[in-house]
Amino acid sequence: MLSTRHTRRTAMAAPHAKGLWQFGAIVAALALPAPVLADPTTQALNSEPVADHIVLGVGGAVVPTYEGSNATRVLPMPLIDIKQGIFVANVLNGVGVAWPTSGPISFGASITYVRGYRQQDVPVGIDHVAGAAGGRFSVTARQWGFIGTLGLTKPFGGAGGLTGDLLVSYPFHLARRVTVIPSVGTSWANAHYNNRYLGITQQESLASGLAAYQPGAGFKDANAGMAVNYGLTRHWSVSAGGAVTRVLGNAAEGPLVQRKTNGQAYAGLSYRF
């Protein structure tokens, strides 16, 4: 679909390593179940409410420069999973509050980071998409060993628009110290977000030589991942994982999508206080 608009992407600073923190979303692009990885205890594997905890760590990841790119970046990655009363902070939902109910469902409201891409990541003539903070509302359910999170995120800058994501994981103990976390997910975006992130305006088309394109609203990707956590001691753990993301629908047909299927991998070390 041809674009008739001449708007340019927000001219903010290029995203930095924090862009990796949003795998729901960005997830970040990007769909690794980091909150579960940081909390590998038995309690995280059942349907009971999760007790207060603080888990901090560091790691590194290899990720696409943007969703649909054929190039990758190596980024530092924090491992954060904090719950103190209703206050929560984690990789998936950002920093905010979560209200538990009498059942296995909790509701959350938070500020998170929505990753963009740098000027050098796209062809000459295409504007970058700045990383930006975003408001997020999420619902998490724990039942029969499954953990599912459904979220909506409104970026305050960058690509703007509105995105939604669903991530379902099933953590289980492979051995006494080994936790395995398979996951699947998908994400949706409205026309404003998709047109800014993977679309090409008429002005960009003239500058780059690529065809103008507007993908419009719709499901933009599906993903599957696998992560493994190994408890070194009562407090220290190492983890590693990977995920594969497939760009879907009209979002996959634009000139900026160089590879419809992208992989990513990471490893990290965390400490539970």
Image (cartoon, rainbow, N blue to C red):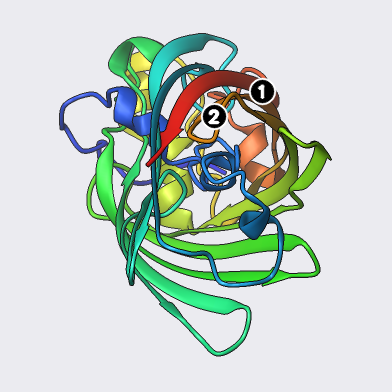
- Residue 164 vs 15, above or below: the answer is below
Residue type (three-letter) at the residue carrying disc 2: Glu
Quarter-of-image position of residue 145: bottom right
- Where is mark 1, residue-wise? 262
- Give how far apart the Cα atoms at labels 2 and 1 are: 7 Å
- Residue 198 vs 249, above or below: the answer is above
Seen from the viewer's position, the closer of residues 219 and 18 is 18
Which residue corresponds to the image point at 54% horizontal and 53% vertical from the top-left?
216
Q: Check the picture and name the quadrant holding the N terminus.
A: top right
Seen from the viewer's position, the closer of residues 84 and 96 is 84
Q: Element under label 1?
A: strand
| Whether residue 224 is visible | yes
Seen from the viewer's position, the closer of residues 251 and 96 is 96
Give left or right: position of 100 versus 115. Answer: right
Seen from the viewer's position, the closer of residues 105 and 252 is 105
Which residue corresponds to the image point at 59% horizontal and 62% vertical from the top-left?
149
